[in-house]
Amino acid sequence: MHVTHINSLYSESTQLVDYITYPQRIHIVSDGGMAVAKGIKIMPAEMVDYVLLGRNGASSGTAEFIKELTSDDSLRVGLIVAAGGCVWTGYSTNVIKSDKYPVHQITTMGVTQVYAGHLSNRIGKFDYVATDSVSCISGHSAWFTAQNLMKLGILDAVVVIATDNGTSEEYLNVFGEYGLSKLASEEDDPYIIKFRLGQGCNVTVFESMASLEKTGNAPVANVTSMHVASEVHTSPLGISCTGAGYRKVIEGVDTTGIDFVKTHGTYSMDNLIEGKLIHEYFGDIRTINYKLRIGHTMGASTAVETGLAIIEESGTFLSLGAGMGNVYSAAVVEILK
């Protein structure tokens, strides 16, 4: 599966959110998700617009690339929005909101499949439109679906857009309550290593060989192998002590000749088991992690982080992901630039 275009949006700077139950700093691209005069903006959708239009730190040319790709009627092109869930957090009416985050009626565009349909009509002509809601591995899961759709000959190319409302009050309170995200009170303690939540978006275009022969686009990377799996556990928020899910996805891909591993790296129990298994399978191989740098972008994280590795690194690497609901993912990527 050939990657011919990739563009990521993220933030390395942080901003304090102090009006919630568990105050904490977040990696913020924009505050567009807060209340405005005529309702609320959908933050995940706004980040997609930034990437498409090359704003707020994203590179330019993405909207034009997609438009040109979908203008060829002989190509069957799909669109998958990797969203983390069926409805983005922060846009429902059954949660307690602070005075700075007032109650609004649920917005239709907060339903991810509705948004995907709306987006598809704005940016091109598509033969297939879907969403992926496999929590934090949604990006990888959508890539896996894209690979299978092209392998089966159903589509020639697939545009995957990964975005989530990773800094909603719901996420901040849940991760703060369970002690997973770094709280404001922990910021000055060098011995406490935790991720912060963050906003992020990634757009990746995949093409088959048949598509490349028509478009003439030059691949920047090849996804040579992918796998998505689950494990049995007593809690949908837990991870087995044997790392069964990680083992399934690692053993489900061809890791021959990889130069490094992009970890999921949440600095939790998951992190300890992931690290142990990486050492078991690959010895002292180099690892990279992005969450301390850009935050945990939730449903967009596997796509944003794998995309960053493609842009910043060289060689062939294994990218790992894990998510709530006992789900795991692995992608082996050959960087061509």
Image (cartoon, rainbow, N blue to C red):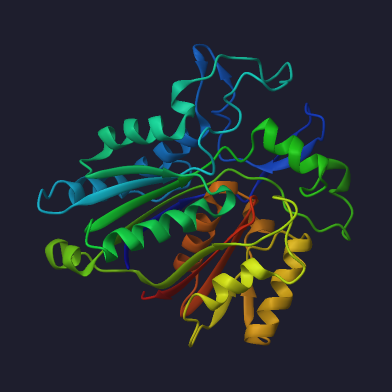
Q: How many marks?
A: 0
Quick check: 113 left or right of 2? right
Image quadrant assignment for residue 173: top right
Find residue 117 and report its horizontal and vertical position in percent: 33, 33
Residue 12 sits above or below residue 251 on the image: above
Of residues 302 and 310, the one nearer the viewer is 302
**Nearest to the observer: residue 249 or residue 307:** 249
**Left or right: where 197 falls relative to 306:** right
Residue under the image location 41 percent in, 34 percent down: 113
Whether residue 54 is visible here, answered yes or no, is no
Q: Quadrant of residue 242?
A: bottom right
Q: Horizontally, is 161 left or right of 215 in the view?
A: right
Q: Quadrant of the C terminus?
A: bottom left
Left or right, residue 110 beside residue 89: left
Question: In this orientation, does residue 140 appear?
Answer: yes
Residue at the far top: name it.
Answer: 37
Residue 226's place in the image compared with 93, above or below, is: below
Q: Horizontal and vertical percent for residue 93?
A: 62, 18
> In this view of the protein, which residue sits in the foreground, 281 or 64?
281
Q: At 54% across and 60% down in the image, what residue appears?
A: 305
Which part of the image, by quadrant, shows the N terminus? bottom left
> Residue 258: x percent and y percent?
51, 83
x and y, in percent, of residue 291 in the image: 65, 57
